[in-house]
Image: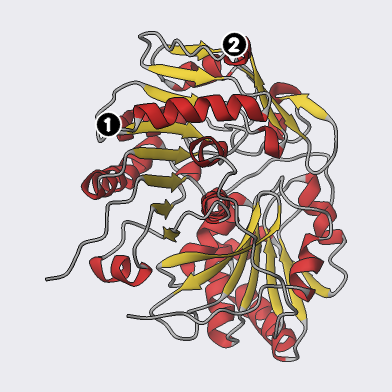
Amino acid sequence: MSIQPPPALYGWYGDDFTGATDTLASLSTRGVKAFLFLGPPTASHLAQAGALEAIGIAGAARSMSPGEMEQELRPVGEFFAAQGVRLLHYKCCSTFDSAAGVGNIATAIQVLRAFISQKQVLILGGQPSLGRFCAFGNLFAAAGSGENIYRLDRHPTMSRHPSTPMMEADLRHHLEALGADDVGLVDWMALDEGKIATGEQPNILFDALKESHIRIIGQELGRRTRNESLLVVGASSVVEAMYGDQNKVTSPLFFPGEGPVLGIAGSLSPLTRQQVDAATSFVRIKLDAARLVAEERYREEITAKATRLLRGERNVLLTTMPDTTTSISGADPRLAQAVGRLADRLLSEVPVRRLIAAGGDTSSHIAQSLNLWGLAYGGQISPGVAVSIGRSDDPDRDGINLMLKGGQMGQVDIFERFAVETIQPRKISTP
């Protein structure tokens, strides 16, 4: 008679793949046995992942309409409820960028609340370790890797985001405008005093200005999940609160990688532009976004050019960014989908084992196009950026190293670092 492993305590859904892998890294570096699936897993894939303490599902809800989000999230909620998770974490971007018609966080709360025993939802507003600070409900964020901190509605990138511009810094007003019911607040002064009185509102936002606030919030999460299930919305600071730093383990070492790197940059952020400019070991190919979406002949030309370079052991970086930064606009989901199909096409021609995707939507569509069923943690290359190891039933794709990077994440030289010092390949164990 086989002994069933205990149910996972922690379940998370990442509304894009970059955020989902960051949460995977945050859990793994704290000694938590975690794995990230690319959808509610089959019994076979769940068994291949082994005994888990935390189960993740990566999705693309951030770029979906409310109707699409409901179709996406309902099976997710059903899966986590069946697994008996106590804490269900809706992992949104650390800047909470969301709009009524695209990636609506209020829609996610409404759908997932039905699968949780506690009807009050907790929202963690900041992540000090990543330069995200919430005070009196207002969110402040660092700009890229710089030292300047901006209120979100004045942030040089997030206030001009192409699909979800953040014009309101008060997360209570922002979420209520999206359709969330009354949002209460536990402010930083109450946290300083160790007082958590959440009241009766259906949604409660927590300030977070420093690590001590995260620890106090973690105590509340632990208390609430002792006997019931709870929905928590926020960045990877939810992991930091729940597990703290007491079990932190050393990240895997980095070693020179083998073979060429394929990089695809779809983010429009100034930081990603700097990272592309610093990628001196890559041959850069600028993509015409309109032609990539519309013209098969153009796609064939790009495929042939990139394939020739990759077969010659050259690193290749495809970019869809405009020439100037005067306007950050024109986000088109068809472009992210076309880039995903192009990545799949290139890997079918040349079995590249190292892949970079920059941009939340870009990363999501690329990962979904590669015939992967899951991602294991490989190592941390920068705060907020992890290297993942892809799992696939296709032996040519199984074990591929991926760096999925959000537009605002990573040092300027991160593409170069991945190209010259990527993780030591792991052996993939099979049952």
Give the left or right position of residue 96, taking residue 268 as reference.
left
Q: Nearer the viewer, residue 59 or 148?
A: 148
The residue where tag 2 is placed is 193
Q: Is residue 104 visible?
A: no
Q: Where is residue 244 in the image (x, y as percent from the top left)?
A: 56, 40
Residue 298 rendering spot, x and y as whole percentages: 64, 73
The residue where tag 1 is placed is 228
Left or right of 364 in this view: 384: right
User: Residue 144 bears which disc, if any?
Assistant: none
Residues at marks 1 and 2, CA–CA distance in whole angstroms: 26 Å
**Image location of residue 233, percent across then percent down:** 46, 32
Q: Estimate the x, y position of residue 41 in percent, counting from the top left.
A: 31, 61
Query: Quadrant location of the N terminus?
Result: bottom left
Q: Residue at x 55, y 15 (%)?
A: 194
Q: What residue type is disc 2 on?
A: Glu
In this view, the mark in front (1 or 2): 2
Above-or-below relation of 91 to 418: above
Q: What residue type is labelled 1?
A: Glu
Name the N-terminal-most of marks 1 and 2: 2
Residue 121 visible to the viewer: yes
Q: Residues within 10 Å of mark 1 (few under 14, many from 20)?
A: some
Tag 2, which secondary structure? loop
